[in-house]
Image: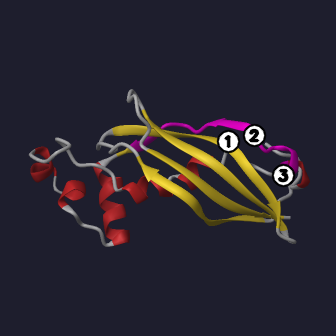
């Protein structure tokens, strides 16, 4: 929690902590498939996916990445901010598939803070962990604009 936008300027290098665990259900995967028009069988066909390379359906990589918003909302809170928006990503890698019925959480560190004349652009290094897995699901550098 930051008490002001200007307080972000000194946050570079700060680890913000970890989000709560997020359930990756088949319903969530199916809803994302509908929204993204990505109906590949490895995501939405449990019977066929059981015979595939992962032994089950898996979440879309971009579904995992989209969880950066709900996962970091409690990690990056600025009092008095008028709003925050997604601004983009510098680098994204999908390291491990996220199987259905698993849980993921995000850890985030502040990589950079830049003034843009209406607030701050905050770049976060985000790592999505799969509960009980050795390798992360996704690593990404995401940018949020926080308006004052």
Residue segment shown in magenta: 8-23
In the picture shown, does residue 72 fall above or below 143?
Answer: above
Count of all numbered marks drawn on residues in the image: 3
Q: Nearer the viewer, residue 79 or 97?
A: 97
Q: Nearer the viewer, residue 25 or 64?
A: 64
The image's colouring method is secondary structure
Mark 2 residue element: loop
Q: Are marks 1 and 3 in contact (CB under 8 Å)?
A: no
Mark with earlier residue (3, 2): 2
Residue pointed to by mark 3? 79
Mark 3 residue element: loop
Question: Which of the two marks, 1 or 3, is nearer to us in this view?
Answer: 1
Asked if the magenta segment contains residue 22, the reply would be: yes
Q: Nearer the viewer, residue 96 or 20?
A: 96
Residue pointed to by mark 1? 109
Residue pointed to by mark 2? 13
Residue at mark 2 to residue at mark 1: CA–CA distance = 6 Å
Q: Are marks 3 and 2 in contact (CB under 8 Å)?
A: no
Q: How far across and how far down the image is residue 64, in percent?
A: 44, 52
């Amino acid at each position: 929690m930051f008490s002001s936008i200007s307080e972000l300027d000194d946050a570079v290098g700060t680890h913000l902590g970890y989000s709560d665990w997020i359930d990756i259900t088949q319903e969530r995967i199916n809803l994302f498939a509908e929204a993204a028009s990505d109906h590949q069988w490895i995501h939405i066909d449990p019977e066929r996916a059981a015979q595939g390379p992962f032994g089950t359906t898996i979440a879309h990589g971009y579904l995992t990445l989209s969880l950066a918003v709900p996962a970091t909302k409690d990690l990056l809170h600025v009092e008095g901010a008028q709003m925050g928006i997604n601004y983009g990503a510098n680098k994204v890698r999908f390291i491990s598939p996220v199987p259905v019925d698993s849980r993921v959480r995000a850890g985030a560190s502040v990589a950079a803070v830049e003034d843009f004349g209406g607030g701050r652009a905050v770049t976060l290094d985000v790592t999505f962990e799969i509960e009980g897995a050795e390798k992360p699901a996704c690593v990404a550098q995401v940018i949020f604009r926080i308006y004052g």
